Amino acid sequence: MCGVAGTYQQSDGKVVVNTMIDRIGHRGPDACGVLEIVDPTTDVCLAHRRLSIIDLSQAADQPLVKDGLTLSYNGELYNYRVIRDELEGLGVRFVTHSDTEVVLEAWRAWGPAALEKFRGMFAFAVHDAATGDLTLARDPLGIKPLYVMRRGPGIVFASELKAIVSAVGPELAVDPAGMVASTLFYWLPPQQEAVRGVRKLPAGSWRTYHRDGTSTGAVYWDPVEVARRAAAGPRADLHQVIASSVAHHLVADVPVASFLSGGLDSSMVTAVAARQDPSVETYTIAFRSQDQKLEAMPDDAHYARKMAAHLGVPLHEIEIAPDVVDLLPRIVDVLDEPIGDPAAINTLLMCDAARASGVKVLLSGMGADELFGGYRKHLANLLSGRYRHVPGPIRRGVIAPLVDRMPVVAGGRGLRTVRWAQRFLTFAELGEEEAFRRSYTLHGRDDLVELLDPDLAGTVDAVLDSHRAVYVDDAGLTDHVNRMCLADSRLFLQGLNLAYTDRASMAASTEVRVPFVDPVVFEAAFSLPGRDKIHGRVQKAALKQAARDWVPDEIIDRPKASFGAPLRAWVTNDLGPLIDDVLVGGDLVSTGYLRRQPLDRLIADQRSGRRDNSKQIWQLLSLELWYRNVRGAGVTAA
């Protein structure tokens, strides 16, 4: 796994590229290469930071130049040996044992059609000396990032936004829509920009830039079409598909370890991996008892120990007891975009510990909840339909006022049921798309408009319309559960979970692989009707059935636990002074982006225990620090 950066048709390309590649040195400490391509009609500069996983020799360093093609590639191609065999059958001769050379030769042989053959995670740039064209491409599900900025007649691109900001910050401006989207979602949907003019290359697409300043491109893998086709086809053998995907994701020339939270998804991945490699090592997170109490958190480490003992594999426990005041600025810088999810801290600290032990590659169970209906919001949205059958006077005159008056904390202990009930009532009366959005966003439309600068009301509506457009695109699916799962795979998975996993793992110079986030697994997931994903009140029912051969019933049937952090304890205790000094006294308030009175009310309700606003406060504090970072790099205000 690596980092890439480059420029096309930029007279100052080498200066820009050197700045960018230095800024993302954490992505590849094993080697660094910067290459200016000599061409009288085209200014091209490509750079690469290498974390060596496959073919550890220097021959596989990048940018890789061979017979007129130059490649800078970030990723892993799990089926590269199969594709290499096919290419050798066509007469191709290889000089390395790397998947990088396979990508280059596949592109030479088949052009963009090669992308449909690739099974892996990737983002790359390839330059063709014969045409002068530069092509960028990204994997089907958006695991690996690639940011692109149009600049004059050409482009600037890099694996992380902060690389571009560090090089050309004074040319950029904060995007108000991105700020609003972050405040609403606590992450950025793929179609939104944090900095105006710097876009993410869409997942499952490629784009070629030409000498004359034009570009062409296409989507080669469309999740909506794949899901619709799968829903109309035969039911997949989930057991076989998942076993095969995990096996593919073990391809490496270094040891592969695994995250083990003690939940279903990571236990499945680890169990299959351990069958292939009984010496696989595992990592889990544990929390301080006082934080668990206030958070009302289950003891995940207990189940992780049981699963590790069942498999007979080593388990490394990492207790989360960080100085969150010092860690928060680091995680904001690591996350690159304005993402306010403290779960990223778990990934960062586990990857730090793994790397300190010499581990470069870890497996994760991420993606199963999105594809198989595993989040509480999925079940809650189904239950909201039943709730609306309760007579209106009882819903609005009895239940709602009663739940509203209940505190979320009593006697120093968090009341999880009350938190859930208050959350449920924010969307239980709404229509399908609006209810789904409100079930996982931080604010309702009116509350958000009240919190922000009044001039941003139209921007709020535009962000809401953008979510609605994605959800409506999924209307070709016939059941509610699969519509939610498809929207999650296109928004929540890409915008939040894959984004923070990439940034947090790469900040520790490690690679995290996600066997559930795989085109074959994706298609298998949508071959199942929603009733097989949520059966009654049992979530991920089909996945649980597929896991019975690998995972003990005690793990499979345990209550759902989030991959979270003791956020309420941090916001209530550790972060109090920072909230007052940095957030309330910060730039977002002084510039008018945030209105002081509703912000004060949000904080007061949290501190009194009347409401659980910890996610909202963490997100706003993260946004404040992110805003200061980009402004400090010269980016102009929104």
Image (spheres, rainbow, N blue to C red):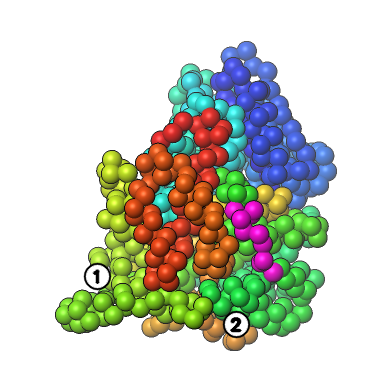
Q: List the residue tagged with mark 2.
A: 555
* Residue 364 visible in the displayed image: yes
Percent across and percent down for residue 18 are 68, 28
Q: Residue at x 29, y 52 (%)?
A: 450
Is 119 situated left or right of 190 in this image?
Answer: right
In front: label 1 or label 2: 1
Marks 1/2 in contact by CB < 8 Å: the verdict is no
Percent across and percent down for residue 31 are 78, 39
Q: Mark 2: which secondary structure?
A: helix
Decide: few, some or many residues near mark 1? Use Cα within 10 Å; few <14, some 14-19, many ≥20.
Answer: some
The three-letter amino acid code for the residue at tag 2 is Ile
Q: Mark 1: which secondary structure?
A: loop
In the rendered structure, find residue 288 and report the number of the disc placed on it.
none
* Residue 387 visible in the displayed image: no
Percent across and percent down for residue 427 are 30, 68
Q: Viewer-proximal residue, 600 or 142?
A: 600
Q: Residue at x 61, y 19 (%)?
A: 12
As measured in the structure, the alpha-carbon distance from the residue carrying label 1 to the one carrying label 2 is 34 Å
Q: List the residue tagged with mark 1.
A: 429
Which corner quadrant of the image does residue 240 belong to? bottom right
Where is 360 relative to 159, above or below?
below
Q: Viewer-proximal residue, 63 or 620?
A: 620
Percent across and percent down for residue 324 are 62, 58
Q: Residue at x 47, y 46 (%)?
A: 585
Q: Residue at x 82, y 39 (%)?
A: 58
Is 421 situated left or right of 135 in this image?
Answer: left
- Span colored in magenta: 319-328
